[in-house]
Amino acid sequence: MSRYTKQHYEDVARLLAKKSPNHPAMIMVKAVCEDFADLFAADNPPVCIHCGQSPVSSGLCLGGQQQYLNHEVKGGFNPKQFLAACGLETTRPDPRCEVGSHDGPCTSACIPERSD
């Protein structure tokens, strides 16, 4: 369980987003934002819906009494969304995306002509 709440993430992003992106101090603010994103992501990683573990690599999942070929990870802190809230990155999906809005990059599941 994370020691941070959604309110913590929003408060930090709001404080760090106060400066204009063209402000000279934004070079340092960007580094601080990235450090916070790393901290929050390490504290709240995605977990496998089958076994409850936070897998560091793909591989055999021993979820309960059934084996799965791969872990199916969900949730966790989204660093890109946090950096966007800080005014540093945008979270626009690929314009060819058929899903519209989702976490993570687009794949062949949402862009049929793409081969992953």
Image (cartoon, helix red, strand yellow):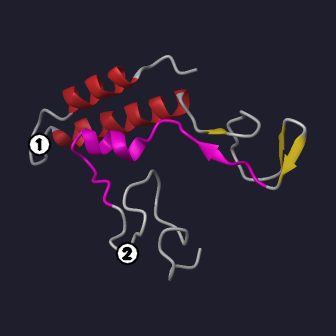
**SS type, badge 2:** loop
Q: Residue furthest right?
A: 65
Quadrant where the N terminus sits is top right
In this view, the residue in front, 82 or 95, is 95
Inspect the magenta stretch and tell me whether residue 80 lies in it. Answer: yes
Tell me which amino acid carries mark 2. Arg
Circle 1 crowding by C-alpha within 10 Å: few under 14, some 14–19, many from 20: few
Q: Residues within 10 Å of mark 2 (few under 14, many from 20)?
A: few
User: Circle 1 is placed at which residue position?
Assistant: 24
Q: Residue at x 68, y 39 (%)?
A: 49
Location of mark 2 (residue): 96
Residue 107 image position (x, y, % from top left)? 52, 67
Mark 1 residue type = Pro
Q: Dot 1 lies on which element?
A: loop
Please count the marks in the image: 2
Q: In this rendering, is residue 28 above or below 103?
A: above
Q: Is residue 9 above or below residue 50?
A: above
**Residue drawn at (87%, 47%), measured in percent from left and top?**
67
Which residue occupies the foreground of this view, 32 or 83? 83
**x 53%, y 27%: residue:** 43
In the figure, residue 69 lies in which quadrant?
A: bottom right
Residue at mark 1 to residue at mark 2: CA–CA distance: 36 Å
Q: Residue at x 51, y 78 (%)?
A: 112
Is residue 66 left or right of 53 when viewed as pictured? right
Q: Is residue 115 above or below residue 93?
A: below
The segment highlighted magenta reads: 70-92
Q: Find residue 92 and report its horizontal and vertical position in percent.
A: 31, 59
Residue 20 position within the rendered picture, expressed as x and y whole percent measured from the top left:
9, 42
Query: Relative to 22, does residue 112 appear above or below in the rendering?
Result: below
Query: Principal SS element in the magenta part?
Result: loop
